[in-house]
Image (cartoon, rainbow, N blue to C red):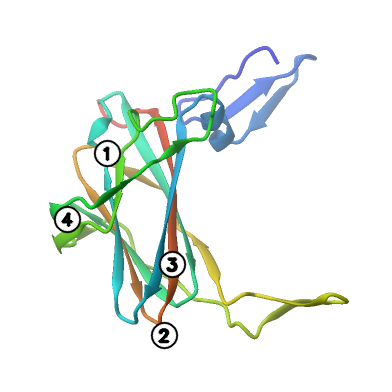
Amino acid sequence: MAFAPCNRYGVAGIIDDEGRHIVGSDVLHAVRQGRAFRFAHRFTAVAPAAAVDILLDPSANDAATVVRLVLEIDTGVDCSVGIYEVPTVIAPGTELVAYNLNRNGDPSMNSVPAVYHTPTVSAAGTLAAPVAYVTAALPVDILYQGTMGDVGAGGAAHGTLPEIYLDRTKKYLVRVTNIGTGAGNTVVAGRLIREPNYYEG
C-alpha cells in the first residue's frame, strides 16, 4: 500500500500495489491513524422511571479538531435516550477511560473528551438531538432451534444512534431513562473520533 488519501470529510481510500484506488471506511481510516477511541459502562438494575447519565467534556480538544460521537445502547428494558448540551453539573462523577482503538498509538485520553459516568447533575440542559427510543426484545423470541437447545434473543436490544459532532466549548449529558415496567441492565457505549475541523472560519 503506497499511501492513504482522504478527502476533507475524512472519507478515506488506499492506492494498492497495482495502482488501484480503493475507498475505505472513514472509521477504519480513523482507527489506523490513532484518532478513534471507545468507552463503555454498564449500569445494573436500573429501576422503572430511573435515569442513568454519562457526561462528555470535549474541552480537551483544540480549535484544529472536532470530536464525532456515535452512541450505542444495549438494554434489557425499554428506554429513552437523550443527548443534552450545557448541563448544570455539580460533580462530574467517575471518569471512564476511552481506549485508543489503534494500540500502536497513544492509548491515553489526552486527545479525546473526558468521559464520566454517574455525574451529579441539577439540570440536564438543552436537548441537542431528538430523543431516541430503544425497545427491548421479548425474551420469548426464539432465533434458532438446534440439537443443543434453543437460542433466544436473550431479552436484550441494541440501538445505535446517529452520529453527532460535539462543540468543544460545551459539555454534553447522555441520559438513558428506563421507560419499561421492570428493572434491568443498560450498557452505554460510544465511539469518539477526532478529525480536522473544517466547520469554522
* Residue that badge 4 annotates: 87
Which x, y percent locates residue 178? Answer: 36, 76
Which x, y percent locates residue 88? Answer: 12, 56
Q: Say which label, 4 or 2, has the lower sequence index.
A: 4
Q: Residue at x 44, y 77 (%)?
A: 78
Mark 4–mark 2 contact, CB under 8 Å?
Answer: no
- Real-space Cα separation, disc 2 to disc 3, in angstroms: 12 Å
Look at the image and tell me in which quarter the C terminus lies.
top left
Does 188 appear above or below 200? below
Q: Amino acid at mark 1?
A: Pro
Which x, y percent locates residue 43? Answer: 39, 65
Q: Residue at x 21, y 46 (%)?
A: 171
Residue 122 image-quadrant placement: bottom left
* Residue that badge 2 annotates: 182
Q: Residue at x 45, y 58 (%)?
A: 161
Taking the image as drawn, is residue 141 in sight? Answer: yes
Q: Residues within 10 Å of mark 3 (few under 14, many from 20)?
A: many
- Real-space Cα separation, disc 3 to disc 1, in angstroms: 24 Å
Taking the image as drawn, is residue 125 in sight? Answer: no
Residue 132 located left or right of residue 140: left
* Residue that badge 3 annotates: 186
Q: Residue at x 54, y 28 (%)?
A: 103
Q: Residues within 10 Å of mark 1 (few under 14, many from 20)?
A: many
- Real-space Cα separation, disc 4 to disc 2, in angstroms: 28 Å
Residue 195 image-quadrant placement: top left
- Real-space Cα separation, disc 4 to disc 1, in angstroms: 13 Å
Q: Residues within 10 Å of mark 4 (few under 14, many from 20)?
A: some
* Residue that badge 1 annotates: 58
Mark 3–mark 4 contact, CB under 8 Å?
Answer: no
Q: Amino acid at mark 3?
A: Thr
Mark 2–mark 3 contact, CB under 8 Å?
Answer: no
